[in-house]
Image (spheres, grey):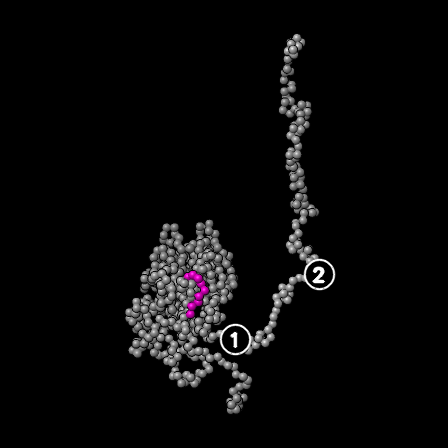
Amino acid sequence: MSDLDVFAAMGIAGFGKKTKQRQLDPNRFEKNKRGDTGAPSTSTAAAVKSEDSAVPGPSSPSATPQAKSDEPEFDPDEVGPPPPPKADGNAEEEPEFDVSDDEPEEAQFPISHEILLKDHTKVVSALTMDPSGARVLSGSHDYDCKLWDFGGMDWRCKPFKTWEPAGSYYIHDVKFSNDGQQFLVISGTTQAKLYDRDGEELATFIKGDQYIRDMKNTAGHVAELTSCAWHPKDSQTFITGSFDSTIRIWDVENKRKQKTVIVVKSKERGARTKVNACAYSPDGGLIGGACFDGALHMWQTKSNFVRPSMTIEGAHAKGSETGSLVFSVDGRTVLTRGGDDTVKLWDLRSFKKPLVVRSGLATLYPNTNAIFSPDNKYVVTGAGAATKGGKGHLLFMQKDTLETVKDLEVDTTPVKVFWHSKINQIVTGLSSGQICVLYSPDMSANGAKLLLNKGPPRKATIEDMSDAVAAPTIITPHALPMFRDSEVGRSTKRKREKERMDPRKSRRPELPVTGPGRGGRVGASATQHVVQNLVRDTTRDEDPREALLKLAATADENPVWTAAWRANQPKPVFAPTEEGQEEGEKD
């Protein structure tokens, strides 16, 4: 008979004081509950009714009336097993949230509750999450990147790190690697930056020579970056797209030069265009690029990248910026969100025209994206507000038809959307600078739920403050050594002598140069010394009249210019003067 059986027979469950388990409030999620998740908007009600048969979920007639209910999410009185067994069996455990059999169709999206992360001051232009779903990385037009950690946040919902990656440049794209240990930040500069999981910079990749015409011969980008993507199988490889008409493949370990350059050629005059979006296929076999001239290109990664293997000219309107390019999980379809207010679905097996086109989606920001749902059945994108300061719309559409299944109204225009498959939560970046995290208590795991699972902060009790109340400690600042004034004559002699020898602290002027050298020049050569003495000018110290008179006698005795005249110059002959004339003139 084991010891545990003996203890059980004696009625002993254990020794010592049992740790008290904190009971979580079953209604703790209700304060974050959205009020408009139950009913679709009037503009899409018809589309929802027509697609009820295609939406997975219960198809019984009893579920139809409940589709109009405003509370499809958790209700502690109705969900789960009958109340008596629930109360008796799980009194000490955290309540679980299970979807009941008569749950309406709208509950398939985790949008019943929300929390807002408010720290950016301008539109959130880049947004992603790490593979585990524990951290959110955001970039904005306020030039900042911010890291948010669900496990470390409290009710204030503040980021644990904020920094400016590239000064006063917008953040265009951010992406976590597949292992979650590092991420890329793409700004309006020509250089991509690599950071570790905690936001410490690891590398800044080189920029190219803008004076080289052939883009294949430059070591990096020479124009503004737009997007990036990690290789799905290799966490050491990523690609970047730029306005210099290239997509470059990089190795994380080599920041001095890219591995390969894909030069995108345009049909327009000049043969160059701007690459607005780029992406890897799920198996890493294809690289896709959407360009400013409206073209959509696909390259085989095993090719030499001279020309694309598949191309569609005019996939989107010419001169519009394509916000995103996403491959489906099976790698057969491609979803693009264009700046021409359209979302298009393409089939790679017949890459000639789109399978489905959805138009009329207002695009207020060029980097507005569209994504697939984790189950690959729906497409999610944002539509801009119709008026300034109006409400934006987050649209959930059927993948096959792009018909709206759910129209979720949000405070402002949604720009970036990210649906994490592991925690089943949707993170949306808004034009107001807020980040809206949508979740459902019964369908989502961890993430935003961790904030409320912690419960309210514990209030300070009298026992916690007893030490401070019973024996208060008063510390005068000048009693501490770091603030104590130095006393003259008390162990300061050696300190003063040491400071006296320090030229910086004693403020001693520069001493003249002694030893080898001349005129303050150390190591002057003999040639310099001779030249300085030869070229010395002394004419300023003499009187010019005296200097000329010194040379008068020498010029008469040994003339330089008039020596030839002495031989052939006639002597002057003057007429003799009479004495009478001279005397007469004198009188």
Q: Position of residue 105 (x, y in %)?
A: 34, 74
> Against 435, is 9 above or below?
below
- Using the image, tell me which numbered label, if any, was put on residue 309: none
Counting from the top left corner in percent of width and height, residue 11 is at 51, 90
Q: In the rendered image, is residue 335 in sight?
A: no
The residue depicted at 48 percent of the width and 79 percent of the height is 22
Q: Say which residue label 1 marks.
A: 460
Q: Amino acid at mark 2?
A: Gly
Using the image, determine if residue 84 lies above or below residue 194.
below
Q: How far separated are the C-alphas under marks 2 and 1?
A: 50 Å
- Dot 2 surroundings within 10 Å: few (below 14), some, or many (20 or more)? few
| Dot placed on the residue nearer the N-terminal end, 2 or 1 | 1
Q: Which region is colored magenta?
A: 115-123
Residue 118, magenta (yes or no): yes
Quadrant location, the C terminus: top right
Q: Residue at x 61, y 66 (%)?
A: 477
Q: Residue 522 versus residue 158: which sits nearer the camera? A: 158
| Residue shown at 43% from the left, 54% from the top | 244
Residue 64 lies in quadrant: bottom left
Relative to 452, is 309 above or below? above
Report the amino acid beneath label 1: Ala
Q: Is residue 378 covered in magenta?
A: no
Pointers 2 and 1 in contact (C-beta within 8 Å): no
Q: Which mark is residue 489?
A: 2
Element class at badge 2: loop
Give how far across and how far down residue 45 sits, in percent: 30, 69
Q: Quadrant of residue 427?
A: bottom left
Taking the image as shown, residue 453 lies to the left or right of residue 555, namely: left
The residue located at (42%, 78%) in the rendering is 26
Secondary structure type for disc 1: loop
